[in-house]
Amino acid sequence: MQEDLIERLIEQFRTLPGVGYKTAQRYAFSIIEGKEERAKKFADAILEAKAKIGFCKVCGNFTDKDICNICKTRDRKIICVVAEPKDILSMEKVKSYNGVYHVLFGTISPLEHRGPNDIKIKELLSRVQNDNVEEVIMATNPDVEGDATAMYIAKILKPLGIKVTRLAQGVSMGSDLEYADEITLSKAMEDRKQL
Amino acid sequence: MQEDLIERLIEQFRTLPGVGYKTAQRYAFSIIEGKEERAKKFADAILEAKAKIGFCKVCGNFTDKDICNICKTRDRKIICVVAEPKDILSMEKVKSYNGVYHVLFGTISPLEHRGPNDIKIKELLSRVQNDNVEEVIMATNPDVEGDATAMYIAKILKPLGIKVTRLAQGVSMGSDLEYADEITLSKAMEDRKQL
């Protein structure tokens, strides 16, 4: 008995990650009950973001220009390598980092038949050689594929005299040992630091 | 360092109820990473819903026509009275209900200076008289204002020989007594039924 246009709007909200029917309904009502101006702004933002945002030609970050703000303004001698564009946003929480990024658009995954040539390793190599890069920080996810990809890239870059580092793995700050899984704990033990 | 268009889209998603920055970001990325087609459909659904959905002339339900589907097809002799259009959707979960609705667009609230003339009670009265209504079910929220509004309307309608009922109040089905608050428990005790 729901009216079709409301149902259509609810269906659209349901396509967002992690949104079920009830949440989508709440979102839809907030649009319907809101001002016309707000609905227009919302729709415009969606269309414009989708139409204009592409990938940075240099690093693969999301941008609405040819080259992203980070590539334009920051220190190109340090490259932080991530698997997906959205990982850059997570890494940007590290306010002290002033280097640039490189998006691989995936990780090496034999299970999913993705080899080194299916992700942007060649592009990384040519940046490293052209920009006099001093350090490459591997910030792929701390899982099997992320680790394998980091190892592979380190193997290629080390002979070129590039310092390759990996994000430290261990127990999370502010968390409770009780809740740490055993792999994380083992890793934290293995990489323990002298005080 | 975030690009402006992404930030704008995130801000829009943040205007949805209960959405914080991280959730909005996740939604925004899903739009940016999704197909152009999907972004267009999404924006269209928002614009069209806002432009075409108004209130049913008879009951106040959301509809994209003059008169909503419920008013057109169901038994007008029973009216279920709710405070807001979206409450109709909640009530529609009661599959066995085949009557129509009436939206008050608010409740009587002395604290917020809303009296009987500020909500659609007059309109309810004229429907009751014109449609030979047999029963009015008060489904305003089970709180002070909802109760007061229900009492007020009952007082007006009873002299006209209309049966006025109120949704039963008590402990929720499937819940645990341990978690029921004391007002709900008192109400459940007071309205206990003989088995």
Image (cartoon, coloured by chain):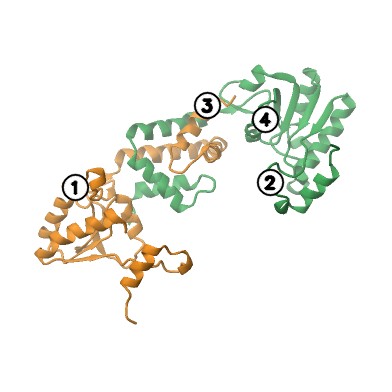
Chain colours: A orange, B green
N-terminal of the two: label 4 or label 3? Answer: 3
Q: On the picture, is B46 further left or further right than B68? A: left
- Is residue A74 visible in this depiction of the protein? no
Residue under the point 75% across and 41% down? B146
Is the residue A16 above or below the residue A139 in the image?
above
**Distance of label 4 from label 3 (alpha carbons):** 27 Å
Same subunit under labels 2 and 3?
Answer: yes
What is the crowding at mark 3: few (fewer than 14 residues within 10 Å), some, or many (at least 20)? some
Give the number of the disc on residue A115. 1
Quadrant location, the C terminus of chain B: top right
**Distance of label 1 from label 4 (alpha carbons):** 55 Å
Front-most of residues B108 and A85:
A85
**Distance of label 2 from label 4 (alpha carbons):** 19 Å
Q: Which residue is mark 4?
A: B94
**Distance of label 2 from label 1 (alpha carbons):** 52 Å
* Residue B21 picture location, percent across and down: 45, 53
Give the number of the disc on residue B52. 3
